[in-house]
Image (cartoon, rainbow, N blue to C red):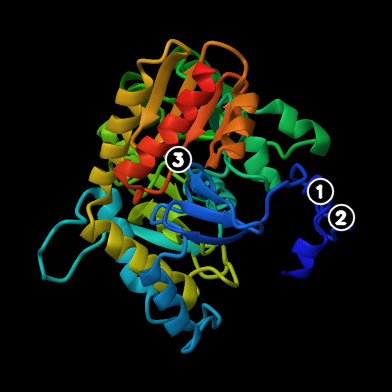
Amino acid sequence: MSSHAENMGVNGELQNCPIMPTYAAPNIMFIRGEGTELWDSEGKRYLDFVGGLAVQSLGHANPEIAEVIGEQAGKLTQVSNYWATEHAHHVAVEIDKAVTGNINDPSSSPYNPIGQVFFCNSGAEANELAFKIARKATSKSKYTVITANDSFHGRTLAALAACGQPHKHEPFAPMPQGFKNIERGDIEALNDAIDETTAAIHLEPILGEGGVWPHTSDYLLKAQELSRDRGLLFMVDEVQSGLCRTGEWFAFQHHGLNPDVVCIAKALGNGFPIGAVWVKRELAASFEAGDHGSTYGGNPLGTAVARKVLEIMKRDNCNKMAQLIEEQIRTSMAELPQVVSIRGNGAMLAIELDKAISKEVAAKASMNGLLINPITPTALRLTPPLTTSEHQIQEGIQILKGILNA
């Protein structure tokens, strides 16, 4: 048993732990995973319908990815971005194809990308660059980015300021300037918020941490049209919803959008830290050497993993896998009287309950071997790996049904 496990107290909480208490004290320690299954330090098995908050799209301990990590770690893990490495170019091309809808193009001719990619290490870093693009690629008088109430874009200061969640701002006030939050889905409020300082509109097609609230196609299309009419950038945060999670490569593709900037992370590394920003070439041209950087961004280990992740997602048609998961969950859960509604797309869903009991339900589910996330007082977020089998989905649903029926 590890030293951490040995320090587990009577209630399962780590005693005298040197880790900062920025999360609630854990009562479970996981030591092993396989696909959608996890095992704790006592040997108990769990079904993971959280998936690292939409990170583990290809499952825990994916053997193909583990092999790539081992092989690449034995060759080269990091050098400065002053030099090129083996995998970054390939991953950038595949991201460009995925964003622009060309990922299944079999053409072998030289590929001419529509956008360019910057590699970073997380979703917050990806959003940080998006905000810098909004300032650098427009005029010097424009710097304000408009986001939605309840949105979430990360926890660095600028990303946190962009979040439409004031209670997260209060401990760190004053927040950096340059952000406005408007009511989700209100096109008049969006129009009224635009002024001479506005540089960009930045939206999550589906608000993840804000409660899995999808924006409607009508609203998103009008928001994009408004940005074009007013000379603004239209940017999307696909950190949680991107890379097959919703049944499309990106959630904005459900609505036929054409964003200027796309923020990507989470599933790109399937647990290995890597993020990316896709930006249209003409906007990327506003940057020059020294304007931005990241020591670890695009390192050969991270991009080797991302290359394999994208290869597997494309090969195994993970879009379809997400769609099947949605069908199973909606069909099985909608019949319960305690379920008011099910919202979201693909394997990014929220089950809205008729009472504010989500934390209680999640706690009981954990006791019964199912991990789910109480995203609001009345809603449960489900983001299982896209590799989750039909049998595992049904097993998890039966656990949930048993708790709700009781």
Decide: few, some or many residues near mark 1? Use Cα within 10 Å; few <14, some 14-19, many ≥20.
few
Report x, y in % for residue 351: 46, 23
Residue at the disc numbered 3: 383
**Res. 226 in view:** no
Residue in the foreground of this view, choosing between 17 and 206:
17
Residue at the disc numbered 1: 21
Q: Residue at x 73, y 46 (%)?
A: 27
Lower position in the chain sequence, tag 3 or tag 2: 2
Residue 175 left/right relative to 204: right
| In front: label 2 or label 1 | 2
Residue in the foreground of this view, choosing between 257 and 40:
40
Report x, y in % for residue 277: 45, 54
Lower position in the chain sequence, tag 3 or tag 1: 1
Report x, y in % for residue 12: 77, 49
**Amino acid type, residue under disc 2 in the picture:** Gln
Report x, y in % for residue 288: 49, 66
Residue in the foreground of this view, choosing between 329 and 257:
329
Residue 308 left/right relative to 149: left
Q: Which mark is residue 15?
A: 2
> Where 56 falls versus 177 (above or below)?
below
Q: Residue at x 40, y 38 (%)?
A: 395
Rendered image quadrant of residue 92: bottom left
